[in-house]
Amino acid sequence: MFLEYDVIIVGAGPGGSAAALILADSGLRVAMLDKATFPRDKVCGDFIAGHGIRALREISPKAYERLQVLPEKAANKSTLLFIGDATPMEFFWKLRSYTVRRIDFDNLLVEEVLATGKVDFFPGHGLKRIEREDKRFVLSCQNGVQFKCNLVIGADGAHSVVARQLAGFSVDREHYGGSVRAYFTGVKNIQASANEVYVHKEVVPGYFWLFPIGPNSANVGLGMHSRHIMKHKVDLKAQFHEFIKSHPVLQTKLGTAQMEGSLQGFGLPFYSKEQCIHGDGFMLIGDAASLIDPSNGEGIMLALQSGKMAAEQAIKAINQGNWEAAALAPYYLAVRNKWWKEMRLKAWAVNNFAHRYRVLNAIGWLGEKSPALRRMLQKLM
């Protein structure tokens, strides 16, 4: 026996929930699956860029309003960039961004999906296999439950089953990053409104971050390009702890702080190469589509926006009775037109300069005196 729908969203993170919220009022039969039960944690830097907050407001004003009153979060107005031993540069942002734990943010979005009463949610239904059958899909879950649908939106993260089985995706270390993160309490000498980024010879090509989520708590992590990790056999967890111990500024902030739980790792598929993110009856969004900024690792904003874009295209396709690849191509083109030029430039900058510490160090010193250089750096952040 199959559970039948018009559209099935695989994955209930920000991208999947955004798609579900757009589809809720479409009149279509919609289901959202996730391997986890909610609330669940998601290892991440927890940063939502300003354009992501704007997209959330467009997708769900109610979810946006709930985010405003969520108690444990930080409204970010600026970023402090520490390059080597130079005086940190502070970049101010026009749009307000937030740092909020994913366990809270993702659960908020799922609750808003459920509040519509128009999307069936199946937590604890990890996708095992997806097959094409007479222009429809059969989705088989690990618990034995099976679904049928016309169109699938793959929102199941960096290790997407949908992307692997339908689009042939695999991990490409040339376009991938590795990161670790932990939560700290008792953090000192931080501004809740200012994220901190550290570029140092011990962590390039990559960066160390300290993103406040409150006056004395923070999401702290280290990210690095996988090509460098593999070539030099970098132990990110060991490097994380060593960098905190060796950096005098971080010692003043984290020296007596307490780490909550353990240090967790996660992968980052970068949008630094073009891939097919749609086909007959399916579209990929967010991390499943490798939509992660190659310069800073930010992906929540792209997940929210791509989820909205895919859902809007799904509605058009189903209503027109055609969900083959050509009918879904406008989604791919919309993603490419919106981000590819910017991401290609950022990837070029990372590939050519992120490992050249002397150049980066010089930029750190020159940045104090050159407004033009500071503007260029801000565009790359």
Image (cartoon, rainbow, N blue to C red):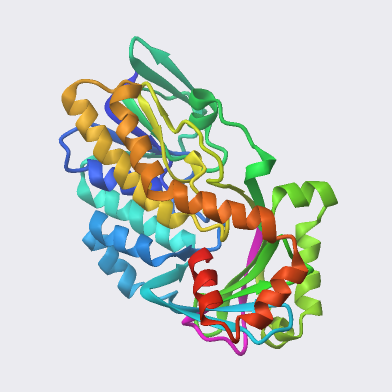
Q: In which quarter of the image is the N terminus?
A: top left
In the image, is 249 to the left or to the right of 10? right
Task: Please give the count of numbered marks on the rendered protein.
Answer: 0
Which residue shows up at 82% across the image and 47% down it? 231
Q: Nearer the viewer, residue 228 or 186?
A: 228
Most foreground residue, 142 or 82:
82
Q: What stretch is highlighted in magenta?
A: 180-194
Residue 81 location (% of width, % of height): 60, 77
Quadrant position of residue 32: top left
Could you tell me which residue is drawn at 28 percent across and 54 percent down? 112
Q: Where is residue 97 in the image (x, y as percent from the top left)?
A: 40, 71
- The answer to whether residue 264 is seen in the rendering is no
Residue 270 in the magenta stretch? The answer is no
Q: Is residue 141 above or below residue 271?
A: above
Residue 192 position (above or below residue 174):
below
Q: Where is residue 87 in the image (x, y as percent from the top left)?
A: 65, 87
Residue 308, image x, y percentages = 30, 46
Residues 372 and 202: in front is: 372
In this picture, residue 284 sits left or right of residue 210 = left
User: Can you name the residue that lies furthest to the top here?
Assistant: 134
